[in-house]
Image (tube, helix red, strand yellow):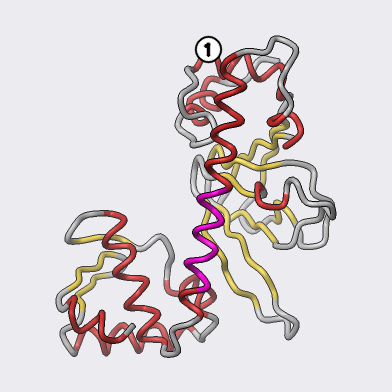
Amino acid sequence: MKIEEKVIACLYETSLFRGIDKPGIQNMINCLNPRIHYYKKNENIAMSGDPFHGIGIVIEGEAVIAKENIAGNRAILTVLKQGDMFGEMISFTEKKVWPVTVTAQSDSEVIFISPEKIITRCEKMCDSHQILIQNMLKIMSKKALILSRKVDYLSIRSLRGRLCAYLIEQWKLQETPVFSLPMNRDELADFFNVARPSISRELSKMKDEGYIDFHKSAFKIIDFEAMKKEI
């Protein structure tokens, strides 16, 4: 199976194929037998409750993972960008249905790989497949830690405290004085399960009080100690 060069180049940059060169990825394609799908902006890539058919990797575009609670309120769990993978946490469960909805935020290209193809050694028993399996285990462990971090957010009672924790986390991740947020105001509101005006109002108050400075999606932490006390 011949895959476009851009797909191989994208997979080469992902955590799943880390340590495997491009020729090695192309050789593995025959064993993995992936499927490529194209989606228009706002089109659902996967719907909550639908059968699960494979782990997805975003090749082009952006997508959001969201979940609705019993009351029907939508909460964004994460934003997917080029090279990001989704579905791996449910790929080995007994009940293989999507627990979330994945929606294209822009025109997108997604490649799907069967999880069984990843963990089953191919007939060639190549070293690259062993690396692939190890990478998969590392990714799932990392995702488990991220889920634990989200529980930490829920333990913070105030919206300001959650915003402070989120901003500090992004600042540390990006290791730069001026950093950008991966989510816009609407997505942040869904993420924290509040109304959008509440996010904008609280951020403006924090700016006026000298906690932070920002312009659009670019942020800078001014008073780190004061923010820590809010958490």
What is the x, y in percent for residue 225? 18, 79
Asked if the magenta segment contains residue 147, the reply would be yes
Q: Nearer the viewer, residue 230 or 32?
A: 230
Q: Residue at x 43, y 74 (%)?
A: 185
Q: Is residue 78 above or below residue 4?
A: below
Q: Is residue 181 above or below residue 115?
A: below
Q: Mark 1: few, some, or many residues within 10 Å (few <14, many ≥20)?
A: few
Q: In the image, is 185 to the left or to the right of 173?
A: right
- Residue extent of the magenta highlight: 141-151
Quadrant location of residue 179?
Answer: bottom left
Residue under label 1, please give it.
23
Q: Nearer the viewer, residue 123 or 59?
A: 123
What is the x, y in percent for residue 68? 69, 74
Main SS type for the magenta part? helix
What is the x, y in percent for residue 188? 46, 73
Residue type at mark 1 is Pro
Q: Nearer the viewer, residue 220 or 185?
A: 220
Asked if the magenta segment contains residue 174, the reply would be no
Quadrant location of the N terminus in the rendered image: top right
Q: Residue at x 70, y 34 (%)?
A: 113
Q: Is residue 133 above or below residue 178?
A: above
Q: Residue at x 70, y 9 (%)?
A: 124
